[in-house]
Image (tube, rainbow, N blue to C red):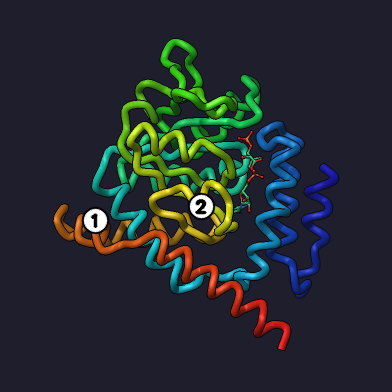
């Protein structure tokens, strides 16, 4: 209630109005039990990096988004959802999953049955038919991973080739790679363990990435499998990460001088 009031009182011409609205939205979803308290901290961490990016999608990231979309269109894929990604982008997650025929699975770091069920309800409200990761009967573990992210669904992440991980920092990517998965991540921090370990690291804000992936999925749906494969083959993630780091460093210097 208080948060909705705050949102209504953000002046339209406030220089940080958009960012404040997103903060307020996340705070509302914290109140309703979708986002964990740590999710609010993660948002602040992301904001700092987004500030350096200039709060727009750099051209470099557009290319990475293109390759990520090619992967989703080409292979059996799952979109992994946590509290923050559900709160920020539930509608777009469903749209993208439909366009790319990807499954949706809830995977939480701060594990909570109630929160998982609320996230599932939110996703279903936006049109998700099936949400994996909730039914204990189908859960198995990522070998070697200690955190709660180890629980994965046999029908979802366990049996899919490409795992799309929006917004997390941790060791899951490394262990998914040990399972021979192709991992696509979205993380504003190019130096996070997740960004460093994944096959396709999108360094950008999830709220901009998903609409772009939806747009690209529509335009790329006519491409043949071999065209999609060519895009993937040409891509070098390490080079992309270096370019984005250089881009961010230059922005910092330009802002200073
Ligand atoms: O819902 P749960 O329990 O699974 O918890 C989810 C969070 C996000 C709280 C959990 O995964 C966590 O603690 O994440 P970290 O370690 O804080 O990492 C979050 C990463 O996401 C950081 O590197 C942030 O820079 C980045 N980030 C935050 N917001 C965004 C983002 N990246 C892209 N888009 C964003 N909007």
Give residue 195's mark. 2
Q: Which structural element holds mark 1?
A: loop
Q: Indicate the position of residue 187 as horizontal and vertical percent values.
A: 55, 53
| Residue at disc 2, CB closer than 8 Å to ligand 1 | yes
Q: Is residue 6 above or below residue 253?
A: above
Q: Which structural element holds mark 2?
A: helix
**Dot 2: few (<14), some (14–19), or many (≥20) neighbours within 10 Å?**
many
Q: Indicate the position of residue 160 as horizontal and vertical percent values.
A: 32, 33
For the residue pair 46 and 130, the one nearer the viewer reads as: 46
Q: Is residue 223 above or below residue 139?
A: below
- In the figure, residue 251 lies in which quadrant? bottom right
Q: Residue furthest top?
A: 137
Q: Which residue is mark 1?
A: 221
Considering the image in quadrants, where does the C terminus appear? Answer: bottom right
Q: Is residue 251 above or below residue 147?
A: below
Considering the image in quadrants, where does the N terminus appear? Answer: top right
Q: Indicate the position of residue 136 as horizontal and vertical percent values.
A: 49, 13
Answer left or right for 10 relative to 42: right
Quick one: label 1 or label 2, which is nearer the N terminus?
2
Answer left or right for 20 relative to 108: right
- Residue 116 visible in image: yes
Q: Is residue 236 above or below residue 34?
A: below
For the residue pair 186 and 99, the one nearer the viewer reads as: 186
| Residue at disc 1, CB closer than 8 Å to ligand 1 | no
- In the figure, residue 147 lies in which quadrant? top right
Q: Say whether marks 1 and 2 touch (CB < 8 Å).
A: no
Identified at 41% across, 28% down, the residue is: 130
Q: CA distance from mark 1 to mark 2?
A: 27 Å
| For discs 1 and 2, the disc positioned in front in the rendered view | 2
**Dot 1: few (<14), some (14–19), or many (≥20) neighbours within 10 Å?**
some
């Amino acid at each position: 209630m208080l948060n909705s009031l705050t949102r209504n009182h953000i002046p339209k011409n406030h220089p940080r109005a958009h960012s404040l609205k997103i903060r307020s939205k996340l705070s509302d979803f914290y109140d309703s039990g979708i986002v964990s308290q740590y999710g609010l901290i993660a948002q602040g961490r992301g904001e700092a990096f987004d500030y350096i990016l200039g709060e727009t999608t750099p051209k470099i990231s557009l290319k990475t988004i293109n390759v990520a979309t090619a992967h989703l269109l080409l292979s059996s894929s799952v979109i992994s959802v946590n509290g923050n990604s559900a709160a920020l982008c539930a509608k777009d997650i469903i749209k993208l999953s439909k366009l790319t025929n990807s499954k949706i699975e809830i995977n939480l770091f701060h594990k909570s049955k109630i929160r998982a069920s609320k996230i599932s309800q939110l996703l279903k409200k936006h049109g998700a038919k099936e949400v994996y990761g909730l039914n204990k009967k189908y859960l198995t573990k990522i070998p070697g991973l200690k955190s709660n992210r180890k629980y994965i669904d046999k029908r979802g992440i366990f049996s899919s080739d490409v795992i799309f991980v929006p917004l997390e920092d941790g060791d899951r990517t490394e262990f998914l790679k040990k399972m021979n998965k192709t991992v696509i991540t979205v993380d504003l921090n190019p130096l996070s363990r997740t960004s460093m370990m994944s096959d396709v690291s999108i360094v950008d804000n999830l709220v901009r990435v998903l609409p772009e992936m939806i747009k690209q999925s529509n335009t790329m749906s006519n491409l043949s499998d071999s065209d999609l494969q060519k895009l993937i083959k040409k891509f070098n993630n390490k080079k992309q990460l270096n370019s984005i780091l250089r881009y961010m460093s230059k922005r910092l210097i330009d802002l200073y001088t």
